[in-house]
Image (cartoon, helix red, strand yellow):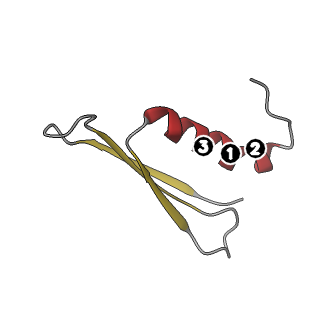
Amino acid sequence: MGTMVIRTWTEPDHSPGFRARMTYSHSPTAEPKTMYTVDPDEVLDAVRRWLLPHTGTPHQA
């Protein structure tokens, strides 16, 4: 199984102020990837996409 690290912060002088950086890999030997977003829903979607290959169950909306 890989690793995902999520860092969130706010930038009060920007709209939206929410910021997130996600660094993840799908296996211990894989090169990590990084993505940035200002949308909390995009963070949740990325976590779901990252978890699905590890759960063995199909996505249910």
Rounded to the nearest angstrom, the CA distance separating label 1 from label 2 is 6 Å
Image point 28% across, 43% down: which residue?
A: 9
The answer to whether the residues at label 1 and label 2 have Cβ atoms under 8 Å apart is yes
Rounded to the nearest angstrom, the CA distance separating label 1 from label 3 is 5 Å
- Mark 3 neighbour class, 10 Å CA radius: few under 14, some 14 to 19, many 20 or more: some
- Placement of the C terminus among the 4 image quadrants: top right
Quadrant position of residue 48: top right
Q: Which mark is residue 49?
A: 1
- Mark 1 neighbour class, 10 Å CA radius: few under 14, some 14 to 19, many 20 or more: few
According to the picture, the residue beneath numbered tag 3 turns out to be: 47
Amino acid type, label 3: Val
Earlier in the chain: of badge 3 and badge 2, it is 3
Position in image of residue 37 (x %, y %): 42, 47
Image point 19% across, 40% down: which residue?
A: 14
Q: Say what secondary structure mark 2 lies in.
A: helix
Rounded to the nearest angstrom, the CA distance separating label 3 from label 2 is 9 Å
According to the picture, the residue beneath numbered tag 2 turns out to be: 52
